[in-house]
Amino acid sequence: MARNNLLSAVGAVGAIINSPEAKKIVSEADVIKSETRNKGGRKPKPKEEKAQNANRFYLDDAQQEKLNEYIGNTGIPVSVLVKQLLIEKGIL
């Protein structure tokens, strides 16, 4: 009995989806416009302005824990923190 109800419901949904009204709505949708529309957010940087060099440094467990605690409290990414410290020291 439940299976027959389920099949009836599925058939009803299929009938709605395949109705002329639904097909008209889909055919009139401007798919190209919606795909190319600006989704907002920050504009991408030009390739010339992007940083392209990566550096790696190693920490012991205690140092890593202290760093994780600091960045967790401040919300500053590690890379930004390192840049700020290098600027403060006059290296950059």
Image (cartoon, rainbow, N blue to C red):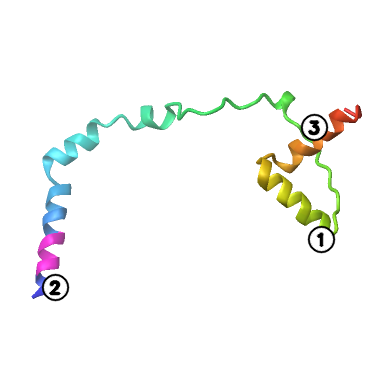
Of the residues shown, which amino acid type is indicated by label 2?
Arg
Classify 34 as above or below 58.
above
Q: Looking at the rendering, which quadrant does residue 33 occupy?
A: top left
Q: Residue at x 71, y 45 (%)?
A: 71
Q: Secondary structure at mark 3?
A: helix
Q: CA distance from mark 1 to mark 2?
A: 59 Å
Label 3: how many Cα within 10 Å (few below 14, some 14–19, many 20+)? few
Q: CA distance from mark 2 to mark 3?
A: 65 Å
Q: Secondary structure at mark 1?
A: helix
Classify 56 as above or below 3.
above
Labels 1 and 2: the sequence-earlier one? 2
Residue at the extreme bottom: 1
| Residue 12 forms part of the magenta stretch | no
Labels 3 and 1: the sequence-earlier one? 1
Of the residues shown, which amino acid type is indicated by label 3?
Gln
Query: 91 or 32, which is in the foreground?
Result: 91
The x and y percentages for residue 3 are 13, 73
Q: Looking at the rendering, which quadrant does residue 80 occupy?
A: top right
Image position of 33 (left or right of 21): right
Q: Residue under label 2, please give it.
A: 3
Q: Residue at x 12, y 38 (%)?
A: 21
Q: Residue under label 3, please give it.
A: 84
